[in-house]
Image: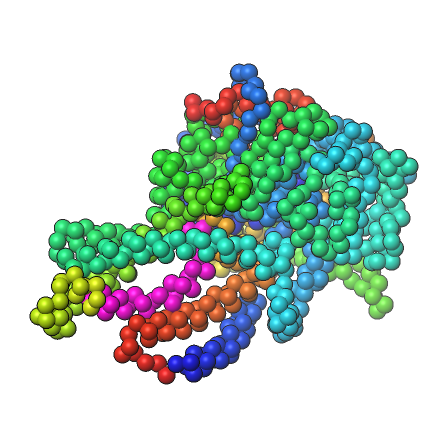
Amino acid sequence: MSNKKKYSLLASSAAVAFILAACGGSDDSASESGSEGGSTEGGSTEEVEIPTFEQSVTNEGEAIDGGTMSIAYVSDSAFTGIFSWELYESGPDADVMAYTMGQLLGVDENYQYDDTGAASIDVDPETDTVTLTVKDGVTWHDGEPLTADDILFAHEIIGSPDYTGIRYSSDFAAIEGMEAYKNGEADSISGMTLSDDEMTLTIQYESVGVQMLAAGGGVWGYAAPRHYLGEIPIADLESAPEIRENPLGFGPFKVDSIVPGESVSYSAYEDYYRGTPQLDGIELETVSPSTAVAAMENAQFDLFTGGVPTDQYDSFADMPGYTILGQDDLAYTYIGFKLGEWQEAQTDEDGNVTEPAQNVYNPDAKMADVNLRKAMAYAIDNDAVGERFYQGLRRRANSPIIPNFADYYNADVEGYPIDVEEANRLLDEAGYEYDGEFRTTPEGEELVINFASMSGGDVAEPIAEYYIQSWANIGLNVQLVDGRLLEFNSFYDRVEADDPEIDIYQGAWGTGSDPTPDGLWGPTAAFNYTRWVTDENTAYMEDLLSDQGFDTEWRAEVFNEWQEYFMDQVPAIPTLFRKAVYPVNNRVGAFDITPGANLDDPGVGYHTWYLTSEERATE
Amino acid sequence: MWKTIFRRLLLMIPQIIILSILIFIIAEFMPGDPFTGMIDPNVDPAQIDALREQFGLNDPLPVKYVRWVGNALQGDFGRSFNYKTDVLNVIGDRLGNTVRLSLLSTVLTYLIALPLGIFSGRYNDTLFDKGVIIYNFVSFAVPTFVLALLMVFVFGYNLGWFPSRGSIDVQASGFWEESWSRLYHLILPSITTAILGTTSIIQFLRTEIIDAKTSDYVKTARSKGVPIDKVYTRHIFRNASLPIASGFGYTIVNLLTGSIFIERIFNYSGMGNLFIESILSRDYSVIFVLVLFYGILGLIGTLLSDLILMTVDPRIRID
């Protein structure tokens, strides 16, 4: 929807799936997809029509005066109700906050900051500074003007020694004087200076990079009302009623009331800086995925957002009264090959860091042979997985960069469509000879590949089985770790710790809105669970973060080359790109989810939403 | 009797200590911690490590336990990792919802079960009795989540008589409106719980009454000329309700624990929902307090049941 930070989908979807498995009596898709799992063995069969989605809809009719739009937030994990960009943790909180708290910076279609928001940003590579300038006329819901001092306050919250949240990062540590402030040695952050009119904030960084121009790329694009929260000790902020019951933002809607974990009602903020919202208000309710479709059948909501269950897509694809919009999710699924180990920071006798914590590649790892990895990629038919298991809402990924980043996504990379012959040829050439049913290593030793996959959702098991079967077809003996799917927590515990029992694993990755892949594939990235490091890759990462990247054409070129390189090395097989769907009732006049669309266009910004009828459409 | 109660209460102390140690050990074996799987390109793994350190998750088990007990004795049960606020606040927010739901469910359970049990026992082998038996088989066999989902779909969605999720309408304001909204949201989940809870009560009552009908004291009473209705209300019912009374202590305690299935399906934020969410997200501080709380309730429930039994049936003495 907007540039709000997308969370790793794993946490919530695993929890969702667990509960659904426990009480999903109504859900008959399990048996269906189970039997389909069998029929896809050995490649694709008949064609399934792949749905295409519009990103916007305009319904005819005059706008009614005001009206309340009701939104179903589909999720099994309730929002915790922390209305603060600095302190929240869970994805649902971000979504619930988006209507009211307001964000400083607008984005274009590539999620790069532009000047459409409440503030503008300027990144200066010459002086290593970032300048944020707040526009005139932006006010908090209590009428106080938004100033750059509120941005400074947001930094002070996160930088405070008493801060309890998760947002502090190396991006903050790179601000001059932040470390001293964090350690309690300084009363203020020396690298942050306010202009005299308090509308401009200049931040001195150790170095700035082009990734800072992307949403989520390192610059904190949020503000906190100092006049409202300034007196509260930082340690008490997260439980303060000013955050939980009466939050103050500068977004298009004010919070009226909150039922923790269940629902929120918002009313229009008339002095919203982009214009008075056309709706009177919004009511948002948490709806369990198991009953979301029933709620749709009864036209109980105008919009379904959050985790609309894509595995039930068949049951609501043609829902009367609704238009289903869809767009690529900021996430992809992948199968990673364990290629090394994580090494903690090395220190000398005085405790000085001699070598930072980093990934260490192991050339002798079981999966170190690139031909083996390629063969495994060719052996599986992800086109069929997307069609069969996800009704076309997922499709084969050809690159580790998602198509949403239009300027950086390399559509020309072919990736690994199913090609069993090629897979066999690669293995034959690399010396993996058959010994009985399965192949051995080139050295003639038995080869058993241990596959870690997470439980959760109806299709987790059939998909894992399908992959194992496909690999058996090319003579590879792949076994599930422990002989079963792993529960979410133990999966991550073991993958993170480089458990030697795990050779390959299936994971998913929320990319956020910054395309720069160093957080997942960089040499010092702890999330690089494959532990894959090469000199070439490190050079690509450095290039992508370098000053030269301000030349976007050059940067796009590096992105393209890196994707080719990555897919050639396949440290991980990107398996599926995902679609997120948003059913919208036909009484909503205009609705648009195109990333980066002009917020003042009908249906884009929340304040432009309008209704064309008092009653929800049922056909 | 008071001596017994006092002794039983004293005995609870070591039981609670053992329980708390057990919880800690088991929690230690659970894979993952509150920060597991928090994979987000906007979150720095170093900060997560720093938080693990800050909240003492890396400390050895005895250190964690002693610290927790020390704080708990001063009334500080820690901070929920999920909800980022005091554990007691988190639980307090949900306890009210759960108590309301269970109270109404219990009342409804007895309202349905007592007449059905009594009349099917009194007029056994009639058409009515057969109907009750069939109802009993069904309510015993149907899993909670099936009935709950069925109720949601039929009465919540298709007929639209009741709200199908939540504990209160977000727009409700003022005491009367809020109370009405709460009650309205309670009806469907509490009827569901009540239907499922009636089985054993009906079954016990029915068999006991059928047994009692042929017993000597009833014959004696009848031959003395006591009217049949009076025999049922004064003599038979009192005896037949003994097995039910023995479970009544647990019933009271169950008012506070909540039902995971019901709360989950009706999106009702109560104790059951909180419990399962805390376990899934490894919200240790909440898990500890909840398990301990349930444990203590269990102990109190046993005691209460014994006391109730003692009061109802003078033949029973516990010393």
- Asked if residue B70 is positioned above or below residue A452 in the image, the reply reads below
Q: Is residue B63 above or below residue A342?
A: below
Looking at the rendering, the stretch of residues picked out in magenta corresponds to: B236-263
Whole-percent x, y for residue A84 in the image: 69, 45
Q: Residue A38 at x, y = what percent?
A: 39, 43
- Look at 84% across and 35% down and name the residue there: A199
Establish if A451 lies above or below B288: above
Image location of residue A398, percent across then percent down: 60, 35
Q: Is there any visible trace of residue A478 in the rendered image?
A: no
Q: Quadrant of the C terminus of chain A?
A: top left
Question: What is the image's colouring?
Answer: rainbow
Task: Depth check: give the residue in front, A254 or A426.
Answer: A254
In which quarter of the view is residue A97 placed? top right
Name the residue rendered at 28%, 74% in the picture: B313
Q: Is residue A179 visible?
A: yes
- Relative to A201, does residue A368 appear above or below in the rendering? below
Name the side, left or right, on which A595 lies relative to A387: right
Which residue is at 35% across, 65% downward? Answer: B248
